Image (spheres, rainbow, N blue to C red):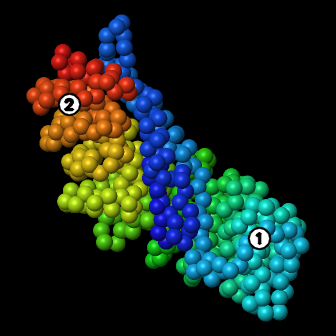
Amino acid sequence: MPRPLAPPLPFYAAAAQSVPSSRLLGPVASSLVQVYSSSSMWSRQRGRLKPLCCGVEELRCRRREREAALRKARREQQLVSKRLLRDEALEEAEEGCVAVIFGEAEIQQFLRLAQRGTEEKEREGALVSLRRGLQHPETQQTFIRLEGSIRTLVGLLTSNQALLQLEAARCLHELSHSEQSAVVEACLPATSYLLTYLSGHSSDFIELCLYTLGNLIVESEAVRRQLLPQGIVPALAACIQSPHLTVLEALGYALSQLLQAKEAPEKIIPSVLGSTLPQHMLQLLQPGPKLNLGVAVEFAWCLHYIICSQVNNALLITQGALSTLGLLLLDLAGAVQRTEDAGLELFLLQKQPSLLPEGLWLLNNLTANSPSFCTSLLSLDLIEPLLHLLSVSNVVSVLVLTVLCNVAEKGPAYCQRLWPGPLLSSLLDTLAFSDTEVVGQSLELLQLLFLYQPGAAQAFLQQSGLQALQRHEEVAQLQDRVHALQQTALHG
């Protein structure tokens, strides 16, 4: 099931006719702009410019504060998103049917026909009409107020007639997509059955159940409280072994909804880490001909939430998270580097714009507070491939530079390993960018290199670095940092 992305980028559509705006690149890019522009690392003191990063601990503190603010802004941009799964062929076949708002009498009539109709076609048709009515919030409210309505729908969900069962599940799916919490919580009696059907044989039905569960999970803590003892984590762990890509993509969505819950670090993520889910997620992120971008994006989100929780990142590393991510980024960087036609680079992003930024977000979270993870990054020789990604997009460039800052911040030994090769020339290239966030992050990395790497400032001057800085002297968001960097380069 195709779709677009995320905070940073876009995703989803096709049979599921929604692209959650919260996960699109636009919102994340704006979050980046807001956070970075509001947290300057430079100031004026006593009439002259002075870099605030002269104190290493102060620099680290400010970077951590900015990282926390950035993650918070990112999370708030995409916290609640729901998927609406609709069969395009079915919608076209029903095009002549006019969806209307139903009252209690009509709903009761549909439920009676669905239960007691003399012909299966008549019973199925009643549920089809009800489903179309449930696309309206007014009908949803009327439905849940009607005594016994959910109980009847759950009874039809457990029917031994496949078509009735499927239509009942579609009705529940429409309810799960509601923005009204009362409607969502009315679906609680159905959750145990939806979990049970994850072990069924129909991939289409399993996919529908997973998206319905994902919609219910994100909306209500009461739903999550009920699903955990009902065994949602083991059910998802069993489901992840499915050979069907549509099922895996839906599973990734449902799991990501579960992992972003506010109570996840204490009540959910330890169970997930104790299951086989992480190993399977990492396998699905392995680069190669079997890599499916839609599936990979969903599980990149899952890893993002797990890593941000800081519950047990060391376990993920022992399971190969960093090496898997490194290989994936190498593969993507290689694709960009091999491409002479810039249009193909754009096609890579349009086809699945979220995968690359999501991988970089994971890498950023792993390296932000851990010297050992930064050492692993250097040992995997990922620096030069990361530099190749600077030409992909402004959002990707900011994320790459953030990861490099995470490494450089760890001190002289790390800057010494960063310094050889094309790092300086790549930074000089980024100073030619017009995007203030890319330039600002480049300035921060240069300041760290000047601080920790002997000879970095002199090499910068020798390669016309001052001229590169001059083009940004009048940019309001960059002025102080540019002037402070000029002073550091000239006077140490």
Residue 135 lies in quadrant: bottom right
Mark 2 or mark 1, earlier in chain: 1
Q: Which numbered tag is attached to residue 100?
A: 1
**Taking the image as drawn, is residue 329 in sight?**
yes
Which secondary structure lies at badge 1? loop
Q: Are marks 2 and 1 in contact (CB under 8 Å)?
A: no
Q: Residues within 10 Å of mark 2 (few under 14, many from 20)?
A: some
Numbered disc 2: secondary structure: helix
- Residue 306 point in image, percent of width and height: 48, 51
Residue 156 falls left or right of residue 451? right
Mark 1 surroundings within 10 Å by alpha-carbon count, few (fewer than 14), some (14 through 19), many (20 or more): some
Residue at left 83%, top 64%? 142
Report how far apart the C-alphas of labels 2 and 1 lie in the structure.
63 Å
Residue placed furthest toward the left: 462
Question: Would residue 409 appear left or right of 489 to someone viewing this image?
Answer: right
Q: How many marks?
A: 2
Task: Please report the residue visible at 47 percent of the width from the left and 69 percent of the height from the top.
Answer: 2
- In percent of width and height, residue 442 lies at 28, 34
Q: Residue at x 78, y 86 (%)?
A: 123
Q: Residue at x 34, y 38 (%)?
A: 435
From the viewer's side, name the closer residue of 134 and 370. 134
Q: Does residue 258 show up?
A: no
Which quadrant: the C terminus? top left
Where is residue 324? Give x, y as percent.
Answer: 33, 58
Left or right: residue 309 versus residue 466 is right
Which residue matches tag 2? 468
Residue 139: x and y in percent read 79, 65
Q: Amino acid at mark 2?
A: Ala
Vertically, is 471 above or below 275?
above
Compared with 107, 339 (above or below) is above
Q: Residue furthest bottom?
A: 119
Q: Nearer the viewer, residue 208 or 233?
A: 208
